[in-house]
Image (tube, rainbow, N blue to C red):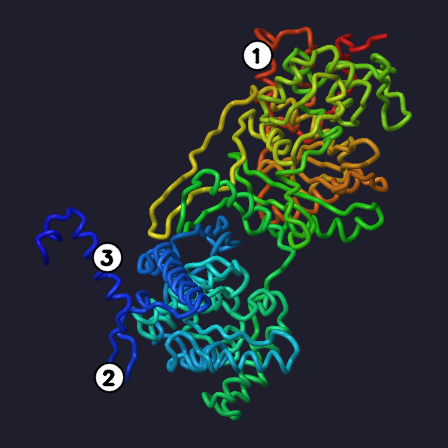
Amino acid sequence: MSDDEKDDPHYPMREAFRRAQMMRDAPPPEDEEGNDRRPFWRRQPKSMPMRILTWASFGITAACIGFAALVFLTLPDLQRAIDRAQMETLSIRVLNAADEEIGVRGRRTAPTVPLGEMPPYLVKAVLATEDRRFYEHKGFDPRGITRAMWSNIKAFSLVEGGSTITQQVAKNLYLDNSRTIWRKAQEALITMWLENNLSKDEILTLYLNRIYMGAGNYGVDAASRYYFGKSVRDVSLPEAAVLAGLPKAPSRFAPTNDLAQARYRANQVLDRLVDAGALTEEEVAGARAHPADVLPRTKEAGREYFVDWVAEQVRQAYPELTGHVTVRSTINPARQTAAENAIRKALDEMGGDRNVSQGALVALAPDGAVLAMVGGKSYVESQFNRATQAKRQPGSAFKPIVYLAALEAGFTPESPVTDEPVSMGGWQPRNVSDRNWGTVTLATALANSVNTITVQVGEKIGMDRILGAARKLGIESPLQRNLSIALGSGEVTLLELTSAYSAFGNDGRRAPPYGIRAVERENGDVLYRHEPKVEQAIPASQAHDMTYMLHQVMTEGTGRAAAPSGRLAAGKTGTSQDNRDAWFIGYTGHEVAGVWFGNDDNSPTQGAAGGNFAAVAWRSYMDAAESGQAPAPLPGAVRYRDAPIVSATTPRSGFFADLADIFNAAPKLEGRQEGNRKAPDFRVGGR
């Protein structure tokens, strides 16, 4: 280096540039075979297309690595998912009052059954059907995929899948049912994780205890208990074949849906057992000759409406609740069966002639416990609960609320009222029959459901009293402030109107209807226990007066067809305009029950009314429900023949109250005989 170069300030830069050119022009380092030893990203392709291809390959590789890393980072905590797979969702098991299971909402599962405790032929059947090479592959089975593709090509349809049991565990435990590249990538990674972290027996145990088996059942033990009434440890070969055939199409092959189809599928499973060499034809011959039977279950069970009702209450009360819970309900098995039979019988025998397609029934104990509930003709055809969700016009079944308000205003069952034409702002309510009732007692007017008198009474006492009485009895549905509601124009549910009547037969006490006695976790912890909430809704004297009048409905009025055998009862018929709705709400000393019949589209029936269609069904229910029970007292239903008549203008105090107490304490007689007594001249619409 010369002195001039040392003094040149740009010399270092020029020297670096010169050396770079020398390196560029120098031949690349080569190995003994003459291959370029530089990294591929430092090699210089000789042409532009090669350069583009090189960088495109590099970009695709980087994208794949990044995608795989992102998929991996978004995977759930797999070990935690294995431990908590059964606890991530809510399963509600509902028991009746006898602690018998009547339904499950959510996942129906059972405690894990170890692989060694399952019958060997069940395990062999599952492997022969779902994954013959399970113990040979590493999570993916190219041979199985090829075989499945060939089977599908020969059949010109999708008859066989290529997923291994490990892949199905990955999909069913951790993933949703979406068909996307992202989900497939997750499935592949989870499959590899399972194969690397669990043994084959552990994977198979997970599969058999978690796979969906139809009818809400998850796992072979839950399915075995549901379909066959026994633990999976005890299933026979034909039963095992049915279970092994379910994972492919659980709903289609569920034996409760189509037993013949389930047996056909089970026979295919037996074929595969023989083809796989797991069993011989002689060993499966007995299973072919004697296929599995399942526990009898009815698809029309009305109790499913009740199960929906209480399960929804649990979900609303505990929105974050997961795991398994047991609901101990109030449903009485005998009464529930009687209710289902009564609705079915009425629709089968009278529905066609009367153009009635639907019916509902609810029965309550004095403390508000729901003893029976039927929400429609067929739960399979419609899950809409007409006992709790449908709001319909009750017609004359609403009149007892008007008459209760009249009692509060000072009327008595003996108060005289007069049948005469009524016109209010162009509205002219008429009676069903052309009979002129003249002057009758309030009790007689209610017993015979005289519309004109009811409207006159309603006008005299005022809307505030009527609406107030409805609220006291638990009517929560909105009611318009016009006198048409006196004839039942307001819409209510069957449950709330039935509950309203409960105060009449219970000395004026009423409790809100309830269907849940307790909610318990799987470990026995009690989340909820019902506490009685019985309140005095109306005075006992008014309740007794209402019972007396409603008893007359069933002995000499519109509800005679509902009178049960050998016991006191009280109730009221109801029929809406054009016979669109037929009601009967009534009670004995044991319970209150209400029935409704009509059509979901609100179309008219062919003369179905509370006094014929509904009353007959109510009696059918009550005779069956209380069969074998001793009749219970019904306070107020009967009175002493010489009980004094107190007019609506006479306060119930002092001498009259003492006199009433004396006669109420006297022996009671069936019915009521007026004799020749003359009632005070207190008339609604008096001439």
Dot 1 alpha-carbon crowd within 10 angstroms: few under 14, some 14 to 19, many 20 or more: few
Q: Does 416 sit left or right of 538 as displayed?
A: right
Q: Name which quarter of the figure residue 666 lies in.
A: top right
| Three-letter code, disc 1 | Asp
| Three-letter code, disc 3 | Phe
Relative vertical location of residue 331 with respect to residue 285 in this rendering, above or below = above
Residue tagged 3:
17
Residue tagged 2:
32
Pointer 2 or 1: first along the chain? 2
Pointer 3 or 1: first along the chain? 3
| Three-letter code, disc 2 | Glu
Residue 146: % across, % down: 52, 81
Of circles 2 and 1, which is in front?
Answer: 2
Q: Does 253 sit left or right of 524 as displayed?
A: right
Residue at 77% across, 18% down: 441
Dot 2 alpha-carbon crowd within 10 angstroms: few under 14, some 14 to 19, many 20 or more: few
Along the line of sight, which residue is nearer the eye, 383 or 558?
383
Q: CA distance from mark 3 to mark 1?
A: 127 Å
Residue tagged 1:
658
Residue at 44% across, 60% down: 109
